[in-house]
Image (cartoon, helix red, strand yellow):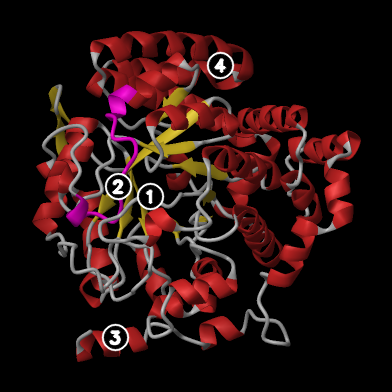
Amino acid sequence: MTNANSSWASERVRPEQINKYLDANGDDFIPDGSIERQLTDKNIISAANDKVRVRDIVAKSLAIQTLTPEETSVLLNVSDQELWAEMETAAGTIKKNVYDNRIVTFAPLYLSTVCINNCQYCGLRASNDSISRGVLTLDEVRGEIEVLAGQIGHKRLVVVYGEHPKSGIDYMEKTIETIYNTKVSIKNHAEFETSIRRVNVNAAPMTVEELIRLKDVGLGTYQVFQETYHKETYRALHPASTPKGHYHWRLYCMHRAIEAGIDDVGIGALFGLYDWKFEVMGLLYHAIELENRFGIGPHTISFPRLEPAENTPLATESKYAVSDDEFRKAITVIRLSVPYPGMILTARENAELRKSLIHLGITQTDASSNIGLGAYNKAKGADFQESTRQQFILGDMRSLDDVVREFAQMGYITSFCTAGYRCGRTGECIMDSLRTGAEGKFCKLNAVITFREWLDDFATPETKAIGEKIIAAEIEELKVKVPKVFDTFTDYYSRTAGGERDLYF
């Protein structure tokens, strides 16, 4: 690390922005010892074999109430396959009750592959000489948006930055502004322009002052994943000489974000670094802490799994590797324990597995994903990956059209709506609406309108034909569910079909 980079890194962690959230003993909200005991407690294991007890807990989830750690520990210890089947059904029911049958899609966009951290499981770690490094210029960013928005039809992005002075807050501001300001012609309708309407950020923990700047340039959701909530494992995987080596700086990044006025925060854990049951408990404790302290929990929860990465043995040799069955159980329990947030399943997983997991409560997923630097403009084919230019290897690189068509065949409508964020339905407001099911009514209206827009502008004939069937069914449902605004909806829908764009409730 150069002297300039070392100086920059040494100033990243601000103790005064952490210490005020610790308790009187300097402890945080992740009680490692208690979690371990809860997962192995004989009384909890006994309760996990009590069908009445398990069904009572699931009933609480169905009432859209956050579970306690003890209740979640009971679910994690269930061994009866009949109960697991009931839990999976309940997870799907919760998703339907809160979010209806909508699925939101997005694309990841890597803007830099430089990083000062040295995480043992990450292909982009500073010591990995096998990786090609770079930072996209603003012109290159525009080029990526021309493909993502103009050719594929994405409306939402998760932009990803490595932690490095070259991709610090000044660069973040400029790139987010560039993304929002890039208007591109639609590939099938040159007379229309489109753009990215929602920019979420996946980046390193930041200071309150930096987060205020991100908010001011239109940040959507701020995502930071703890990677592992287990302190000993965290210390072993993240060198103390790097900013990421500071467990508490990362753990309290969402506190700082909410303090900075950012309503929507996204948490997650990287499954495969430690015991998957412990990570589920960590996510629960994190959600409970945010709820108790700020009155709002996480907007989204993500649960990526370790995937192969260039010159990174730990990514494929971890003793905590999570099987498909364990992964399925983790998703189910996360949905039951924290029933209101969006749940993000990424293209790290292969297409077959993703399809089998959607009904467990997934609300968001990426599609047409390519995580190489500048990859959307350079891709040589639908399944092209260049391991030396990306953080890890993806499992599903199907086009957005393919994914949307599969969702429609499964009975889901793909929503390209970003209205709630622009109308102020964020933070505590959206949390209340989600718990009561009210948000789903707005979202269903906007889902149909934006799906109409995307089908007309980007869908292949096969996908459009299947999508038309979904839209017809949705409109019939809206007649019954929202009669008071159905005439307005019909007007917006007809205007959209006639060529107007970005109409929403």
- Cα separation, mark 4 vs mark 2, equals 41 Å
Amino acid type at image mark 3: Trp
Upstream in the sequence, badge 1 or badge 3?
A: 3
Amino acid type at image mark 4: Leu
Query: In which quadrant of the rendered image does the N terminus lie?
Result: bottom left
Mark 4 in CB contact with mark 2 (< 8 angstroms): no
Which residue is painted at 66% across and 33% down in the image?
91
- Cα separation, mark 3 vs mark 4, equals 54 Å
Amino acid type at image mark 2: Ile
Residue marked by disc 4: 478
Q: Can you give x and y, in whole percent of width and height, for residue 392 in the image?
A: 30, 52
Which residue is painted at 59% across and 85% down in the image?
19
Residue marked by disc 1: 307
Magenta span: 387-402
Front residue of 27 and 82: 82
Where residue 87 sits, quadrant-wise, is top right
Residue marked by disc 3: 8
